[in-house]
Amino acid sequence: MERTLSIIKPDAVSKNVIGKIIQRFEDAGLKVVGLKMLHLNKDVAKGFYKEHNERAFFADLIKFMTSNPVVVQVLEGESAVRLNRQLMGDTDPQTAAEGTIRSDFAKSIDANAVHGSDSLESAAREIEYFFDKSEIFS
Ligand code: ADP
Ligand code: MG
């Protein structure tokens, strides 16, 4: 059993598809064991994406992630990290496989509907970044 962090990004929240995206996780056997809606400020967004702070797109990424509220979730299940990445699809919605969340709900590589932890180590850091232990229920 693993846990991973998922974020429904500002573009998807604005498009009113929170429920449709969470349905994908539940249908695939992942359980939502923590969930909150937040409007990230710049410092929180920068800390979350610190591994990307040298990248050319970093400033735009922070602007985007702070542009509207997000929904942050802890997903639990067998191989949760890999399964969530599969459900999400490639970073670029244009190359994401058909039927994936990014293919179905996003149009561009910067506004790509969801975040998902890329390893168990990232998942542990990212879950702790947004959730107190008392806010996770399994
Ligand atoms: P992923 O979200 O698939 O793990 P990365 O960790 O590489 O992808 O990038 C983090 C986020 O930064 C992406 O989800 C996307 O929102 C943004 N991003 C990545 N690459 C680019 C790019 N070339 N141009 C604009 N934004 C990007
Ligand atoms: Mg990533």
Image: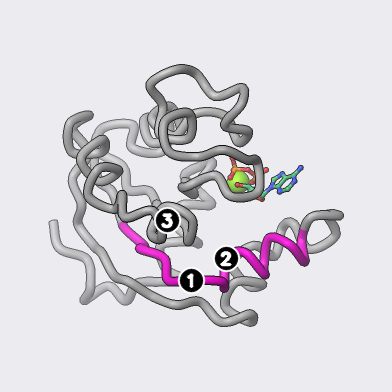
Residue 78, quarter of the rendered image = top left
Label 2 Cα neighbours within 10 Å, binned few <14 / some 14-19 / many ≥20: many
Amino acid type indicated by mark 3 = Ile
Q: Is residue 25 above or below residue 34?
A: above
**Disc 2 CB within 8 Å of nearest ligand 1 atom:** yes
Q: Which residue is mark 2?
A: 65
Q: CA distance from mark 1 to mark 2?
A: 7 Å
Relative to 35, residue 55 above or below: above
Residue at the disc numbered 3: 7
Residue 63 is one of the magenta-drawn residues: yes
Distance in Å between CA atoms under marks 2 and 3: 10 Å
Magenta highlight on residue 5 = no
Residue 93 screen position, x and y as percent: 57, 31
Place of residue 29 in the rendered image (x, y in percent of width and height, measured from the top left): 18, 32
Q: Which mark is residue 68?
A: 1
Residue at x-position 56% and y-position 71%: 67
Q: Residue at x 47, y 44 (%)?
A: 120
**Disc 2, SS:** helix
> Bounds of the magenta span?
58-73
Ranked by sequence position, the earlier of labels 3 and 1 is 3
Query: As shown in the figure, which amino acid type bears the numbered disc 2?
Result: Met
